């Protein structure tokens, strides 16, 4: 334990703070700072990893479908559109539902609704990707 003088936001005076490993206590009013409450500096990628994964999952089936068509593998493109969209929508729905609600029943309902929405979105993106790839191939014919 050691002491230091600092401005106390509670009694608004320069007071002597008693400092321990976990907190600082004002010797006048007893106001206590939790040292752990200080915002940790987390790199941008770590802080936004959830969003990065969300977009990566949402864009992955369309990207794969595009590459499949461009590479002449129509069967693969179809599989990716149907199954890939399912996996993508499943991940995105669970992730979003988990962020928006803490109630288990609400999460499940929201998860189903979001799954339908994201499946349609991913399916649409796959079709757009396939169409784009088809056009791109025709250009080089
Ligand atoms: Zn104080």
Image (cartoon, helix red, strand yellow):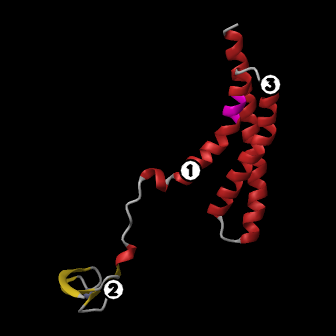
Residue sitting at 34 percent across and 77 percent down?
A: 35
- Of circles 1 and 3, which is in front? 3
> Which portion, as a residue range, is magenta?
62-66
Q: Secondary structure at mark 3?
A: helix
Give the Cα distance between marks 1 and 3. Answer: 30 Å
The residue closer to the viewer here, 75 or 91, is: 75
Q: Is residue 58 visible?
A: yes
Q: Nearer the viewer, residue 18 or 118?
A: 18
Looking at the rendered image, the quarter that the C terminus falls into is: top right
Q: Is residue 104 above or below residue 87?
A: below
Residue position for label 3: 74
- Packing grade of label 2 (10 A; few <14, some 14-19, many >=20) is some
Quickly name the residue at label 1: 51
Residue 63 painted magenta: yes
6 versus 29 height, above or below: above
Q: Which residue is mark 2?
A: 32
Mark 3 and mark 1 in contact (Cβ < 8 Å)?
no
Q: Residues within 10 Å of mark 1 (few under 14, many from 20)?
A: some
């Amino acid at each position: 334990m050691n002491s230091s003088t600092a401005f106390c936001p509670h009694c608004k005076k320069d007071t002597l703070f008693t400092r321990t490993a976990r907190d600082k206590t004002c010797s006048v009013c007893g106001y206590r700072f939790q040292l752990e409450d200080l915002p940790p500096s987390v790199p941008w990628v770590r802080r936004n990893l959830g969003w990065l994964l969300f977009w990566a999952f949402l864009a992955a089936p369309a990207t794969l479908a595009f590459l499949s068509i461009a590479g002449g593998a129509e069967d693969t493109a179809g599989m990716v559109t149907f199954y890939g969209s399912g996996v993508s929508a499943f991940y995105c729905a669970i992730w979003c539902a988990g962020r928006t609600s803490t109630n288990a029943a609400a999460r499940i309902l929201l998860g189903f609704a979001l799954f339908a929405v994201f499946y349609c979105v991913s399916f649409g993106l796959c079709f757009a990707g396939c169409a784009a790839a088809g056009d791109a191939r025709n250009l080089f014919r």
